[in-house]
């Protein structure tokens, strides 16, 4: 009879050891997310990355609509904007992962399409709102926290956003005098230009100009 009880005693002892080990391990587990060193930057990057993802998708929809309306210049610009924001989104996603986070791609619902001039105005409003809002907050926070890696990525975003805003304003105001220069976008930082570049490398990230994507 005693021999029969021994296995049960051993099993009980092992279970007690396992429970005790689990409890000790839980006390040594990672801190809550709010105690992470870069928590504020990580949360801001999530919001900015979602905004860039939505904008890239939206500009792509606008570009396809402009192509159907036989507006090649506007379509080329919108495709360039979609690509630039896609690059920025990818950079933000890499930054999130480098900080130990994980980005979840948001569900994007297609909004009701209107005419291309209206789409350009909406694109300008959205771009300005994101840059003046979450993008600036993220950049200032990264600088204050001393996170040079994140700050560099966000200064790239800011430089591209400024150029996009200027180009959008120019196209909206140009009316019939539309610019004919192709749009070029850096695949590394998303920098955009609507004129011929005279430098061999991107002035922001040093990417070879030969690697730029051209939209025309």
Image (cartoon, rainbow, N blue to C red):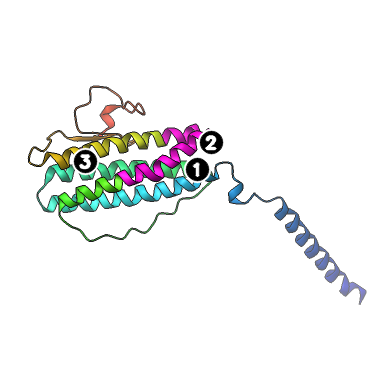
Q: Which mark is residue 41?
A: 1
Nearer-N-terminus badge (1/3): 1
Tell me if label 1 and label 3 are in contact, CB under 8 Å. no
Residue lying furthest left in this view?
176
Q: Position of residue 189 (x, y in %)?
A: 35, 35
Q: Is residue 6 above or below residue 127?
A: below
Magenta residues, start to end: 128-153
Q: Give how far apart the Cα atoms at labels 1 and 2 are.
A: 8 Å
**Is residue 188 shown in magenta?**
no
Q: Position of residue 168 (x, y in %)?
A: 21, 41
Label 3 crowd bin: few (<14), some (14–19), many (20+), radius 10 Å: many
Judged left or right of residue 204, residue 118 is left
Q: Secondary structure at mark 1?
A: helix
Q: Quadrant of the N terminus?
A: bottom right
Viewer-side residue, 57 vs 8:
57
Q: Give how far apart the Cα atoms at labels 3 and 2 are.
A: 33 Å
Q: Which mark is residue 1?
A: none
Q: Which residue is mark 3?
A: 168
Tell me if label 1 and label 2 are in contact, CB under 8 Å. yes
Which residue is depicted at the point 50% across and 41% down? 98
Q: Which residue is mark 2?
A: 145
Which residue is depicted at the point 82% across and 68% down? 12
Which residue is depicted at the point 25% across and 45% down? 124
Q: Quadrant of residue 88?
A: top left
Q: Secondary structure at mark 3?
A: helix
Q: Position of residue 82 (x, y in %)?
A: 27, 45
**Is residue 144 shown in magenta?**
yes
């Amino acid at each position: 009879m005693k021999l029969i009880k021994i296995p049960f005693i051993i099993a009980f002892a092992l279970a007690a050891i396992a429970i005790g080990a689990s409890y000790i391990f839980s006390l040594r587990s990672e801190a809550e997310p709010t105690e992470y060193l870069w928590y504020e930057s990580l949360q801001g990057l999530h919001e900015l990355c979602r905004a860039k993802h939505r904008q890239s998708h939206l500009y792509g929809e606008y570009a396809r609509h402009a192509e159907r309306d036989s507006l090649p210049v506007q379509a080329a610009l919108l495709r360039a904007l979609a690509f630039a924001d896609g690059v920025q989104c990818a950079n933000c996603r890499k930054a999130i992962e480098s900080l130990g986070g994980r980005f979840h791609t948001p569900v994007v619902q297609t909004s009701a399409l209107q005419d291309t001039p209206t789409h350009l105005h909406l694109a300008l409003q959205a771009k300005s709102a994101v840059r003046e809002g979450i993008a600036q907050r993220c950049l200032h926070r990264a600088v204050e926290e001393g996170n040079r890696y994140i700050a560099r990525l966000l200064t790239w975003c800011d430089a591209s956003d400024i150029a996009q805003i200027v180009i959008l304003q120019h196209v909206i105001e140009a009316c019939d005098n539309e610019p004919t220069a192709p749009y070029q976008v850096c695949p590394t930082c998303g920098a955009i230009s609507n004129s011929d570049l005279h430098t061999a490398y991107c002035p922001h990230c040093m990417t070879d100009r030969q690697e730029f994507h051209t939209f025309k």
